Amino acid sequence: MKAETENDRPVLGKTENDRPVLGKTENDRLVLNKPFGLEEGTCYLVRGKKAETSYLLFQAIVEQGTPGLCITTRFPEKVRSRYRFASVPVWWISFVPGDQHYAPNAIGVLAKVIEGFVDENPAGCVVLLDG
């Protein structure tokens, strides 16, 4: 199915089985056409009761070769396996102590982590903050 367009720019659409996509699908896999309606250097809020759309969009962008950082309240190993984030750092927002774990009230620390990641990737990157 083709995505709906707005001013000739692809926007979020859905496949027959209701999975969110940008652009079109090939055998129910996400295919993103550049430009896919997202501008570099811009923050986006994806509204919804579930974060699935955000994760699928993030996954598709990372699969195109863009460096990504995922910060989530979900258990990191579940996120890595569900979305095939083998090479993507997944940092956990949790009071559980550990490496790459950040307390929910440590907003300043998270801001510095994101800033550092963006600075390390001057050619472009994507950050998913779920939480």
Image (tube, rainbow, N blue to C red):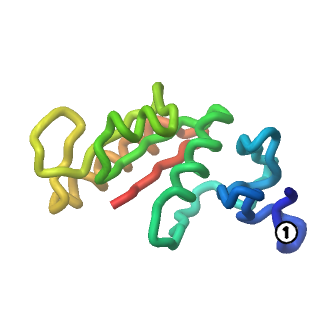
Q: Is residue 68 left or right of residue 5?
A: left
Name the residue furthest top.
87
Q: Please state the horizontal and vertical placement of residue 23, each as a whole percent of the image.
A: 80, 54
Q: Please state the horizontal and vertical placement of residue 41, each as a whole percent of the image.
A: 58, 57
**Residue visible at 64% across and 55% down in the picture:** 40
Name the residue furthest right.
8
Q: Is residue 39 visible?
A: no
Question: Relative to residue 18, is residue 30 depicted above or below?
Answer: above
Question: Relative to residue 61, is residue 14 depicted above or below?
Answer: below
Q: Please state the horizontal and vertical placement of residue 125, each as a whole percent of the image.
A: 55, 43
Q: Please state the horizontal and vertical placement of residue 79, each as a whole percent of the image.
A: 40, 41
Q: Amino acid at mark 1?
A: Thr
Name the residue furthest front.
17
Q: Is residue 34 left or right of residue 53?
A: right
| Image quarter of residue 7 | bottom right
Please identify the quadrant where the C terminus is shown. Answer: bottom left
**Residue visible at 82% across and 51% down in the picture:** 24
**Residue visible at 63% across and 43% down in the picture:** 61
Could you tell me which secondary element the residue under label 1 belongs to?
A: strand
Q: Is residue 50 left or right of residue 27?
A: left
Q: Which residue is mark 1?
A: 5
Crowding at label 1, few (<14), some or many (≥20) Cα neighbours within 10 Å? few
**Residue visible at 64% across and 43% down in the picture:** 60
